[in-house]
Image (spheres, rainbow, N blue to C red):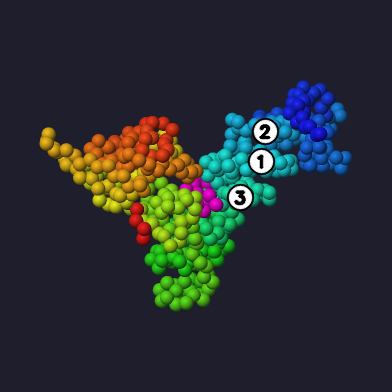
Amino acid sequence: MRTEFYSSLSQNFSQLLENADDYNVTIKVGENQNTQEFHAHSSILRARSPYFKSALSNQWANKKKDGMILFTKSNISSPVFTLIIEYIYTGILDLTNVSSSDILGLLVASDELILEELFKYVQNYLIEKETAWLNQNLVKILLIVSKLASCKPLQNYCYKSICADPDSFFASEDFPILNKDIFLELVKRDDLGIEEIDLWDHLIKWGISQTLTIKQNDVKKFTDADFENLKKTINPFISHIRFYVISSRDFYNKIRPYKKVLPLTLYEDVMSFLMAENKPQQKRLPARFSPYLYINLPESKIIRRKHAAILSDRIHYKNASSKTSKEYKYKFQLLYRGSRDGYDINTFYSKVNRQGQAIAVIKIQNSEKIIGGFNASGWNYSYRNSYDDDDEYDCYNDRNKNHFIFSFEKNYKIKIGKFVSGTGLLYGQDCMIEFGDGDLTFNGRKGSCNQRSYDQPILDVNSFVAEEMEIFSIRKL
């Protein structure tokens, strides 16, 4: 019978790392004032890392001092190498309280040191546990991981995240410095969820920032040299722009001013197609397909197109992670915004009443959370501005089984509360919004969530203060 005592082995090697006086390797990591020396044993390093096996071989020239082998790794920080050396000696990795940037540094270092097991684990950890941080830093992360051949899963995650929510990516202050190859990879994708004319706008913005000889953004002031230099910058992208799906109005207003950066035959062919409906002679790429392109969402201060697509899927009884079918297109119409219209209850009902199915979204103050509810019947509230003792406000309990409440985390993970029994949606004089028997109530800027009528709570706290609130009617086109 075979028995393995890995726990004791790991503990013993941990003591060897901490207390040994027979080490023969010194590794200096970090740079400038942030350097630290680590002591190690060449035999252990060779056994655990193919990199060190080569580096410590007779064929690799190593700097020695008093019989000690010296290494300098200025590109690896002290916190990162602390994790690596503990992993090498004990097989233990503890990422508790480790910053996201250090975890990314650990990924890069484990690739350099050919620690394959550690590399695979850290890459999966970033994708599964650090999604919010990844989505906030996509440009910087792609610049790093695009250089790592073994980092395809993380590269793919970043590209898919951008395709799903391109608006925030292109609005990033880092976008103008985006690497050309990375941007080109995005433009080639069929699933990039952006209108083609918007992509053109971003391409021009990026191209101007990358062309240092252009000193102004006003195309009317461009010289022939400016156009020629911009053409060289964006030329690799032109064949991947779907010009034939752009409206004639947008082509005239936004592309025609940059006519000089396009091949003349392409320009004339698109003009012929758009203005005279002639058959294209140039290669015509199909329209991009992304579920988020099939959502008509006006400017919102709270939600993005991906939020709207996920909610639309839920309304049509689909799994929230599935793709919206191409046969459906949804229009979200802004009916009410708290910061614009005020939080008076009568004003609220004058804006939203009898407008059909509607979605309420609330951004919680000092939080990344978005909560809200789907009113499957629409607000149909009969109210009076004044009443005497004989009159009452018309209160009505709408028990439509398709009502639901929800909350979004920053990484678009949604939590749904389904209406079960009791109060579905209450129209009353006290609250603007009242889903369930207290499951989601809101009036003014304050609200509460106490689970009773819906199958699960949408918040971990019972009360909240809103930063903003919006109501959208939703219709299938």
Mark 2: give few (<14), some (14-19) or many (20+) Cα within 10 Å: some
Q: Earlier in the sequence, mark 3 or mark 1?
A: 1
**Mark 2 lies on residue:** 93
Kindly check if marks 2 and 1 are in contact, taking CB atoms under 8 A apart as contact. yes
| Left or right side of 363 for 288 | right
What's under tag 3, amino acid-wise? Answer: Gln
**Quarter of the rendering occupied by the C terminus:** bottom left
For the residues marked 3 and 1, what is the alpha-carbon distance in whole angstroms? 15 Å
Q: Position of residue 135 (x, y in %)?
A: 53, 44
Q: Closer to us: mark 3 or mark 2?
A: 2
Indicate whether 60 appears above or below 282: above
Q: Is residue 3 visible?
A: yes
Residue in the image at 20% along x and 41% along y: 394
Q: Residue at x 59, y 48 (%)?
A: 142
Q: Which residue is mark 1?
A: 121
Q: Is residue 38 magenta?
A: no
| Image quadrant where residue 441 sits | top left
Secondary structure mostly seen in magenta is helix
**Residue segment shown in magenta:** 160-174
Q: Secondary structure at mark 2?
A: loop
- Rendered-image quadrant of the N terminus: top right
